Image: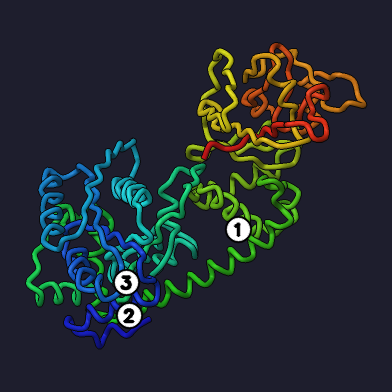
Amino acid sequence: MANSKKLLPSDLSAFVEAKLKNWVQPGRHLALALSGGADSVALLDILAQLRDSLHFPLSAVHVNHQISPNAADWADFCARLCVGYDIPFQVVKVDLKRQSGESLEALARDARYRAFAGQPADFIVLAQHLDDQAETLLLQLLRGAGAKGMSAMAELGCQHVRAGLPANQRLSRASPLLLRPLLDVPRRLILDYAALRGLEWVEDESNADIAYDRNYLRHQVMPALELRFPGYRDTFARASRNLAESAQLSDDLARLDCTIAVVNGNLRVDALRSLSGARARNLLRYWLGEFGMPMPPAGRLENLLQQLCSARDDAQIRIVLGDAVIRRYRGEVHIERKTPAPPPEPALIWALQDRLDLPGLGGRLVFERTTGQGLSLARLTAAPVTIRLRQGGERLRPDCLRPTRSLKNLLQEAGIPPWQRQRLPLLFSGEKLVFVPGIGADCEYQADQNEAGIVVKFGALF
């Protein structure tokens, strides 16, 4: 960590410049998260000074949570500020629908990160500082977080932007990285810089409300800590880095375990059972995290592990976790989004398009033109091609050396979980079933060598 103790307010711009040179190549687009408070206003002033010499495009984004009656005034203040600096500016309004028991702070934070994820930038620059780092560590400790939670914030990272997205969403471009160039700087130095530069900013009245946990720590606990332990900020930051290393080692171990325990994205129950309790919990946490799942409390995680490993093999395991459902089938743990059963719909017509989105099934059919592979294009299109859901009684002959068989038996033999079978899009030519995802094409419709064909694939929509 750079030695911020010796920094003067007049040195802050050079300090940020050195940080940016470590991470930002010329031409990379920086978008500042501008709240209008002292920290982000000071950082805006610094970035505006550096954009020409470091050759980066700069914009600013303000997230309007629509909580305070002053929210519109803050957005207007930020807009005027950016006009003065000649910086492109955008306001993103978010609608916080708070459920009973939900933390307003957490809800607002998640909304911000979803807004940041949608920015067409290489970096989202945040004005979080050393005091924020200390508060975050203490908050996580009070919540009983593990090493990963207490490793707090990184100077450069992406996990929070991605966590703000739905777990099954994959962006078509790289998500912007989070950059925190002031993370080693105490807030008093930022305020001194703002005073030196004669900057103006707005004050969020909620920052004084000690009903919020972070504000209680900031106004009641941290001042008392500083009286006895004046260097607590740096000490907490050092503890955070040590915990981050421990968390990294845990992830490295989980990745090694995944090479044996995870098959086609599913977690093998026998592999979980073979591990020690701590290692199995570590693997389960990591596997859930790979799906973007919010981490359950320790007690809930232990209960989940017990149900997956201890229930008899034929037990119907269905565990709701947030907006997902955890299931066990044939010795493997599956995770899926909670979605209503697909409604009965008329057959969809395939009009030779390359892809067909099926949002009701949470998936997409992709049709790839080939030669000598997949379905014969001529035989497939000899009758109208439609996509339908399973109704029961369907039959298919995927193997030319075997007779036609019921789709029910084929699905069971292929190990396709029961809850997925009703969501499979079936491809028909006229009234003839010709293709089933996970099973294959009917023998009569398989393309011959040198014949124009279509390879059909069904995958996640995002």
Image quadrant where residue 309 sits: top right
Q: Earlier in the sequence, mark 3 or mark 2?
A: 2
Question: Residue 163 location in percent, x, y?
Answer: 44, 51
Horizontal relation, residue 144 to residue 303: left or right: left
Which secondary structure, mark 3? loop
Q: Position of residue 117 (x, y in %)?
A: 38, 51
User: Which is closer to the viewer, label 1 or label 3?
Assistant: 3
Q: How many neighbours does mark 3 have within 10 angstroms: few (below 14), some (14-19), or many (20 or more)?
A: many
Task: Tell me the SS state at disc 2.
Answer: helix
Residue closest to the eye, 110 or 381: 381
Residue occupying the point 69% across, 27% down: 418
- Which amino acid, mark 3? Pro
Horizontally, residue 151 falls left or right of residue 254, namely left
Residue farthest to the bottom, as pictured: 6
The residue lying furthest to the right in this view is 401
Q: Which mark is residue 282?
A: 1
| Colour mapping | rainbow
Amino acid at circle 1: Asn
- Asked which quadrant contains residue 65, the reply is top left
Q: Disc 2 designates what residue? A: 18
Residue drawn 54% across the image and 52% down it: 289
Residue 139 appears in which quarter of the rendering?
bottom left
Q: Label 1's element?
A: helix
Q: Which residue is mark 3?
A: 181
